[in-house]
Amino acid sequence: MKSIAELQEIRNKAKQQVELRKEHSGYRVIVGMATCGIAAGARPVMTAFLEEVQGQNLGNVTITQTGCIGLCRLEPIVEVFEPDGDKVTYVKMTAEKAKEIVEKHLKNNKPVLEYAIGNTEDK
């Protein structure tokens, strides 16, 4: 750090990420971050969701993490709760898939069913 302004910029960025994790109405994205999820690559998935949602300024999206969701062979797992309470469970996630889900599901309300649990069982 070279200046107070740089420190302030770091602080503001951290506050924005904290705001993304607070509860409010809209979409709620939950990333499975137990040991199995982290070992399978959940940390880059979580980071991709945070960066994309923040970068696109989607104020109606909350991002949180949870422990084991119970389907370790399908990790990383992400659950997206829609404003009406419906849930889509995405499995075998990657950072690239997370970016696509932000664009299609969270921004345009069109779930990416090819990554959803019911459509990946045979793959």
Image (tube, grey):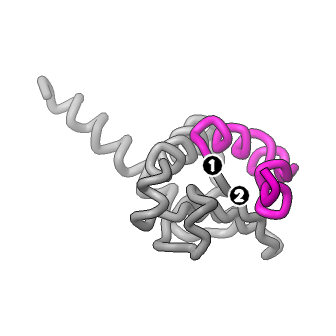
- The answer to whether residue 63 is magenta is no
Residue 64, percent from left and from top? 51, 64
Start-end of magenta stretch: 94-123
**Label 2: how many Cα within 10 Å (few below 14, some 14–19, many 20+):** many
Three-letter code, disc 1? Met
The one nearer the camera, 72 or 18, is: 72
- The answer to whether residue 96 is magenta is yes
Three-letter code, disc 2? Tyr
Q: Please, what is the dominant secondary structure of the magenta stretch? A: helix
Q: Which residue is mark 1?
A: 93
Q: Which residue is mark 2?
A: 90
Q: How far is mark 2 from mark 1, CA to CA?
A: 7 Å
The one nearer the camera, 101 or 94, is: 94
Residue 77, percent from left and from top? 61, 60
Asked whether, in this view, residue 10 is left or right of residue 117, the answer is: left
Q: Residue at x 57, y 39 (%)?
A: 95
* Secondary element type, mark 1: loop
